[in-house]
Image (cartoon, coloured by chain):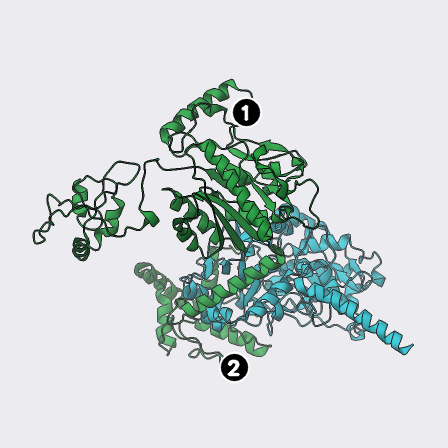
Chain colours: A green, B cyan
Amino acid sequence: MKLSALHQSYLNRRSNSFRSPTSVDSSVDGSGKSLIAVFWLILHCLCCLISLVLGFRFSRLVFFFLFSTSSTNLYSAPFPDLPVKHLDVHTLGRRLEPGANLTVASGTTTTKSSRVVVGRHGIRIRPWPHPNPVEVMKAHQIIERVQKEQKSVFGMKSSKMVIAVTPTYVRTFQALHLTGVMHSLMLVPYDLVWVVVEAGGATNETASIIAKSGLRTIHVGIDQRMPNTWEDRSKLEVFMRLQALRVVREEKLDGIVMFADDSNMHSMEFFDEIQNVKWFGTVSLGILAHSGNAEEMVMSMDKRKEMEKEAEEDSSSLPVQGPACNSTDQLVGWHIFNTLPYSGKSAVYIDDVAAVLPEKLEWSGFVLNSRLLWEEAENKPEWVKDFGSLNENEGVESPLSLLKDPSMVEPLGSCGRQVLLWWLRVEARADSKFPPGWIIDPPLEITVAAKRTPWPDVPPEPPTKTKDQMPLSQGGNTAVVIPKQQQHSTKIRKPKRRSKRNKHEPKLTDTTQVSSSSSKRQERN
Amino acid sequence: MKNLSSLSAIILFLFFSASSAEQTVRTERISGSAGDVLEDNPVGKLKVYVYELPSKYNKKLLQKDPRCLTHMFAAEIFMHRFLLSSPVRTRNPDEADWFYTPIYPTCDLTPTGLPLPFKSPRMMRSAIQLVSSNWPYWNRTEGADHFFVVPHDFGACFHYQEEKAIERGILPLLQRATLVQTFGQRNHVCLDEGSITIPPFAPPQKMQAHLIPPDIPRSIFVYFRGLFYDVNNDPEGGYYARGARAAVWENFKNNPLFDISTDHPTTYYEDMQRAIFCLCPLGWAPWSPRLVEAVVFGCIPVIIADDIVLPFADAIPWEEIGVFVAEKDVPELDTILTSIPTEVILRKQRLLANPSMKRAMLFPQPAQPGDAFHQILNGLARKLPHDKSIYLKAGEKALNWTAGPTGDLKPW
C-alpha cells in the first residue's frame, strides 16, 4: 500500500502538466505519516535529484533492476499474452511499476477481469519495418480497382470514342508539336481515333511520328503544299479539316469529333468534359498570341495599358475565345480575342517575330457529335446543315457554318468558365533545316580539332572532310560533333560530367566540343 | 386458377428481386443481427419522462462554458434537448417506460477544453438524491427503469485514467440504471451488461461542409492523423494506447502507402474522403470520433482496439463494414490490409455508402429520422417491456447509498 501511495503521487504528478486535478484528496487513501512513508519520501526526493542530474528517470531503472528478471529489449519481439491470473511482477515484463501490478491485481482478480491488461506494454516493431514491394504492388492494384469502381458508379456511365482531327505538315517544329499532341492523346482514357491530315501529301516522316503513339490513326494526305502566310495557312487548314470530316462521314466513325491542332495544348479535363456533348458543343479556348518574344510582349503590354486607359469599362483583355452565357447559363454569344491592340503588329508570314493572332472563331474550340456528319442518322437535329452538300467555295470559316442555327450550340466547361485547352502558334524560321526524322544518320562529320586539349595522350584528330554542314536553326551558332571514336574514349574518361555538360551546351564557340568531355573547359569559358 | 396464381406470384417475386437487385448495385442494405433495425421508428414504442432538475445541473454548467456544445462529449446536452421536444416525451410519469435525468456530468472543462471528472460522482449522487426524494419512481425500482447519458472516457467510472477508473468501478448508485455511454470494452468493469454504446459527438454541419464530389478518386491507401506518443502524460511510451499507436508509427513511418502523421491539416475531412482505409486506433480509451468520421466519409475504418464494443453493435454489423486488427498484429498491418480481397473491400465501401449508416452515427440539430438519437431510443425500446423483477417490494433496498470512496459522499 505504501507503494501505491508512491504510485499515486507519481501519477498525479505526471498528469499535472496536462490536467490539474482540483481535488487530489479523493484518490489518496489516507496513508498516515508513518516512518516508512517518510522514508519513501526521502528516497523519492533522492531519486528525483539523481534523475535531474542524469537527465532521465533513474528510479525506474532501479525498479527494473530490482524486480524484473527478463532482459529483453523494449523494442523487440512481441509480448506474450498475459493471462490475468498470473499477475506476477516478473512475467509482466520490464519496467512495469510494481505498484501498478498490485493495485491492478487487487482490482481485477476480484471482479470480472478484462482480458486486456492495464499497464505498460511494449512497442512492437518488426525486424524490418520497411515496405514490402509485393505488398505495395498489391495495394496499388487495390487502389486502381477502387478507383475504377468509383468511376463506374459516380463518373461517366458509357464513354464515346474521341475522334481527333489534326492538320499538319512537315516542318522543323512539326515533331515538337505533334509529339505533344500525341502524348496528350495517348493519355486519354477513352477510345480514340486520330485523323491526321497532311499538307503536301502523306509523308513517311509524319507517319513515323504518329506510328509511335500506338493509337488508331487515319493518315490522309492532300496534295497542296502549306503556304507561307498565316492567313493562307488557316484557309488551307480549314480545307484539311473538312477533308477529315469527310473521312469521318465515309468511315461512319461514331464518336465525338474534336479538333486537335498540332501546336495546341489540351488538358485531360477537356476530354472528360467533351463526353457531355449531345450534338454540337463549344468550350473556352485560351489564346496565347505571344509566341514568347519578350520584347514584343512588353511592347504590346504597354500598348494594352494605354488602350485600357482610353477605353471604356467593357473592353476585356482576357485572351479567351469561348461561349458567353447569361445568368441562366444559356448561350448568348461568343467571347472573341480582341485583336485591336495588335492591329498592324501581327505576324503575316509564318516565321515573323510578332504575335500570331487567331481567327475570329478557332475550330479547336468546337466539338461535335460525328453523327451530325453522317448521311442518315436517327434523331439528327434539323438545325444542322447536311454535311454532304456543303459547298466550300461559299467560305467556311468556322464550324458554325455547318449549322443553320448557331444558338443551338451547347456551352461546355460550366458555360465556358473553365479554360480547358490553349491555342498557340509557334513556328521556326523559314530557312531552318532539320535532320529528317530527327535522326542523325549517317553521323555527321565536321570536326575541328580542339586547340587546347587537356588529354595529352590523345592525339588531336586531323580534320576529316566535311560531308553536310548542318547548322541548327534559330541562332546561327555552329555546333560541331566529334567523330565517333573520340566520343567513345571521352565517354570512358569522364562519364560523370556528361549530364552537367549537356546543360551548359548552348554557350558554344566554334572550337568547343559537343557531348561529354571537357567540362573544365566550359567553366573556363 | 392455380396456374394463374402461381404465375402472378412468380411475376411479383421477379419484380421484387429486380428492384432489390437494383439497390445492391450502388449500396447494400444493412441487415443487422436484428433485421433492418436502423430504419425503425421508436415513436409509439416507448415513452420517456424527463425530470425537471434545477438548472445548476444542466443549464448553468452550459452557460459557464459553452464549449461543452462542441466537444466530443456534447451528446449528453443534445440528447436532453432532443428529448424535450420529441414525440416520445410524456408529461405523465405514470405512463412512462423510461425516466431521463438531465444532468451534464462532463461539462466541467479545463482551460484547454478537456473535461475533469472529479466532481461528476458527487454531482450524479446529488442529482439522484434529489430525484429519489422528490419523485417516487426512483425508489420503486432503485433506478432500473432510468437511463443516464454518461459519454465520458470510461463512462460511469468517472475517471480518465483506466487504472483509477477500474478501481472506482461504476458509480454504485447507477448499478441498476441503464447507461448510455461511448465507452465499450468487453469484460470491463466500466461496461455494464445492459448499456447502450453510442458514437462520440462529431459536428454534423462541419462534416457536411467539407464534402467533396464522390467521383474524386481515392488515392490514399491508409490515412491517420493524430498522436502516436502522448508526450505530456506518457513520455516513454507504452502506456498510451497500450503501445499500439507507437507501434503503428515505428513500423510504418517509412511506408509510402501509409499517410500517417501528427499534423492538424485543414483538409483533414477532405483527405479522409480520398482514402481507402482510415485507422481508428485506441487512445487512452478505446473509442474515438475517427470512427464516426470514417463512416461519414466512406473510408473503411481499421479498428485497432482489443475487445472494443462499437456503437449500436446490435444494429450495425461492424465486422462487415470495418476491419478489425488485434493490437499484437499491428506490425503486420500492411500485410493484413493488402491481403483483403478486392471484392470484400468494394462490398465494405458499398455498405458504407448506405446513407442510413451515416445518419445513425450523427447527432444532427434538429433531429432527423434514423439518426443517433433515434437509435438510442430504439435501443431503449428493445429493452422493453421491463421485467417484473425490477420493481422492488416495499422496504426492499438494492443499492448501497454509502458505497464508494468517501470523497464522493460529500454534497455537491
Compared across the picture, whether A186 is left or right of B81 comes to left
Mark 1: which amino acid? Ser
Residue at 61% across, 42% down: A281
Compared across the picture, whether A55 is left or right of B321 comes to left
State the SS at label 1: loop
Tell which of B20 and A168 is nearer to you.
Answer: A168
Mark 2: which amino acid? Lys
Compared across the picture, whether A337 is left or right of B52 comes to left
Query: Which residue matches tag 2?
Result: A85
Specify the quadrant of the image occupied by residue A432. Answer: top left
Counting residues from the start of the chain, the first of labels 2 and 1 encountered is: 2
State the SS at label 2: loop
Measured from the top left, where is residue B134 in percent x and y?
78, 58
Q: Mark 2 touching mark 1, by CB under 8 A? A: no
Measured from the top left, where is residue A371 in percent x and y?
63, 49
Identify the disc placed on residue B398: none
Residue at 19% across, 39% down: A509
Measured from the top left, where is residue A134 in percent x and y?
43, 70
